[in-house]
Structures are given as C-alpha cells and as structure tokens.
C-alpha cells in the first residue's frame, strides 16, 4: 500500500486485534461522515490487556528515510474513533511515532493529539495538524533537557536529524519504546501502547501512559506531509484487492509478505462458534482462527459462509485472522 505496512500484536489482550484497509461505502453504524479521501480507511483496534506486552496496532512507512526534519513544514492525518475504553478524561486517537537519527543513534519522538479543552469527538472524522495541535514527547531525553513541547520545540530538538530506516541504520522490529516498533518503520501511526507503563516519559493525561490510546476502535486516513519547498506527499488509505484463498494458504510462509498487499476471502464451514470468534474448515486439511465482531446471529456450527479477512498472525497455530466489524458474514 504505497510503501505502508501494518502489524498487530495481541499480547495480553483478550482478543485478536483488527488491522485492515477497509471500504467504508454504505456504512451506517458509528461513522457519521465519509472519510476525508476516497471511500476507504485503515481500521485499527487492539483489545484490552493489563500486562506486558500490551496489545497494539501499527501502520508505518520508511518512505521518508533520509528526509531531514528541517525540511518538513507540517504533517497532517485524519482519524475517526467510534469507541475508546478510557474515552473522556485522557483518551486520544492514534499517536504518531518518529524514529530519527543524527547518524550516530536512534531518537524516538511521539506526537499525541490534544485532550484539552475537550477530547476528540467520537463518531466523526477529525483532521490533526501536528504543527499547531498536540504535544511531542522525546523518549529518554538527555539529562536536564525538557522532554515534551509543541511543534516548534520538536523542530528545535530534532534539528539536524533525519528519518531513519535506511539499510545502514534500520529501525528494529521491537515492542520496546525507544528501540523500535512492530513495523520497523521510522514514521508510524500507532493505536494502543506497547507497554502498560514506561519510564521514558509521563502521561499526557491523568493516568498511566498506556491508557492514553488503549483499546480504541479507530479508522485513519489521508496522511499528508508538507515540505518547505512547497512539495508534499499524500497517502489515501483505500481497501486492497481481495483474493480468494483456501485456509491452508494462510499457513504458508508467503503470507508474511502477501498480507501487506491483499485482502483475502475464504469460504468454508463454521466450527466452535461463540460471541467473539470461530474456526473455519474448508476441506483443505487446515483451519484458521477467525476473530469476527459481528455476523449474522443465525450463523451456527456447520453453516457454509464466505467473508473477507486480514491475516493478523500467520505464525500462530492455527493462524489468526480478523474480519472487520462491518463486514458481515455471508451465506453463499
């Protein structure tokens, strides 16, 4: 997807996260307005977890590797949150992670949307301009240095630094803040926090750091970065093409790469259904664990169904996949 890739970690969460590019055409529940660009957006939702590693979802890119922060005029993106377990006092939409380098070491900064005078409204699209809204935080700043501030503070602290992610200085895949992230990308939109507490900075609200955007259902769209020379890059997150596969294909190691390019579709019979998930069998000799927030409540064990899905953890046994909240199961 134009150089963007996603990853999700269930961690201590009670369920498989949702992470996929979705078409929002015709949605009537939750989202009151259309997305700011096109008809689709990226859906990201971790589930509550109270120990490390904490559940979270990342959507990131290394498209800007080597670009100096000095050359960036502003960054904007849009989000729509339909549910947040801690919404009200300190709930925020997905944060933006920056992994920068001065050629000697990685530096991590994180932008968080404002929560005062009011937190972001539920069920409507909001566009965030990082140069005039929110707070930047520096992970583990030098002793005696201020650790958070506005856009001007960020530009001063990051002066002379550039986006990492090059072959010579890659961003590690890690759940440890300051070390790396799930996607190994230098610019990352993240929903949920990788740890339930962290000593590298304080909370932007009145509770533990991880609670600020823990367990929220959010769509993100239209990421834009503007440069001082008047140029810009814009990314519209649209649904990917769907490919019909057998469940045994989800077990194949190729899924690690293929899941970044495609939405998949499967047909098979339901097994061990409950309120949150079921197993799908299709006669191929393999099965998969399907996280599904909503389906036809008349569906029952043995029913033949077809549905689109995203691969979340192809290495689990059986592999874990997710079906979007508004992608209902269909009986062929």
Image (cartoon, grey):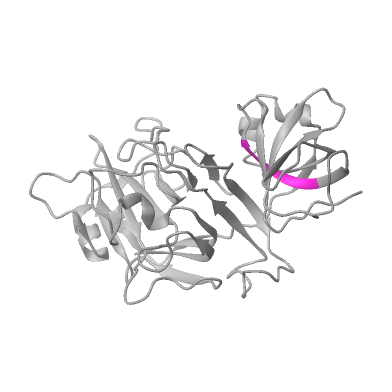
The residue located at (27%, 64%) in the rendering is 151
**Above or below, 22 relative to 88:** above
Q: Nearer the viewer, residue 160 or 28?
A: 28
Which secondary structure dominates the residues rendered in magenta? strand
Q: Exactly how many numbered labels are in the figure? A: 0
Residue 277: x and y in percent read: 69, 42
Q: With 86 as the anchor, is 43 left or right in this view?
A: right
Residue 292: x and y in percent read: 69, 48
Residue 46: x and y in percent read: 52, 48
Q: Nearer the viewer, residue 299 or 281?
A: 299
* Residue that lies at the very extreme toward the right in this rendered image: 332
Taking the magenta stretch, the answer to whether it contains residue 176 is no
**Above or below, 117 relative to 295:** below
**Above or below, 260 relative to 117:** above
Q: Within the image, what quadrant is residue 199 found in?
A: top left
Q: With 275 as the anchor, is 96 left or right in this view?
A: left
The residue located at (22%, 34%) in the rendering is 104
Q: Within the image, what quadrant is residue 140 found in?
A: top left
* Residue that lies at the very extreme toward the left in this rendered image: 144
Q: Can the viewer see residue 281? A: yes
Taking the magenta stretch, the answer to whether it contains residue 310 is yes
- Magenta range is 307-312
Q: Nearer the viewer, residue 160 or 37?
A: 37
Residue 230: x and y in percent read: 40, 67
Q: Can the viewer see residue 262? A: no
The residue located at (48%, 36%) in the rendering is 11
């Amino acid at each position: 997807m134009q150089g963007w890739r996603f990853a999700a970690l269930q961690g201590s969460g009670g369920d498989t996260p949702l992470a996929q590019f979705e078409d929002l055409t015709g949605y009537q529940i939750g989202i009151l307005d259309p997305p700011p660009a096109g008809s689709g957006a990226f859906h990201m939702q971790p589930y509550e977890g109270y120990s490390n590693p904490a559940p979270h979802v990342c959507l990131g890119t290394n498209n800007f590797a080597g670009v100096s922060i000095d050359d960036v005029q502003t960054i904007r993106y849009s989000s729509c949150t339909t549910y947040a377990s801690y919404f009200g006092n300190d709930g925020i939409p997905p944060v933006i992670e920056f992994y920068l380098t001065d050629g000697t070491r990685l530096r991590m900064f994180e932008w968080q949307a404002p929560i005062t005078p009011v937190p972001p409204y539920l069920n409507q699209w909001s566009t965030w301009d990082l140069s005039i809204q929110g707070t930047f935080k520096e992970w583990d700043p030098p002793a005696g240095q201020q650790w958070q501030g506005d856009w001007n503070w960020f530009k001063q602290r990051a002066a002379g630094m550039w986006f990492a992610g090059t072959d010579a200085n890659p961003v590690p895949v890690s759940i440890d803040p300051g070390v790396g992230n799930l996607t190994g990308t230098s610019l990352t939109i993240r929903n949920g926090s990788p740890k339930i507490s962290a000593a590298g900075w304080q909370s932007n609200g009145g509770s533990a750091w991880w609670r600020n955007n823990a367990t929220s259902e959010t769509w993100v769209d239209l990421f834009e970065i503007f440069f001082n020379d008047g140029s810009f890059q814009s990314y519209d997150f649209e649904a990917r093409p769907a490919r019909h596969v057998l469940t045994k294909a989800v077990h194949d190691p190729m899924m690690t790469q293929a899941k970044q390019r495609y939405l998949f579709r499967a047909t098979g019979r339901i097994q061990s259904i409950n309120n949150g998930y079921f197993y799908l069998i299709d006669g191929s000799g393999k099965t998969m664990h399907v996280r599904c927030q909503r389906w036809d409540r008349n569906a029952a064990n043995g029913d033949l169904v077809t549905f689109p899905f995203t691969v979340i953890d192809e290495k689990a046994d059986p592999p874990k996949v997710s079906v979007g909240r508004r992608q209902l199961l269909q009986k062929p």
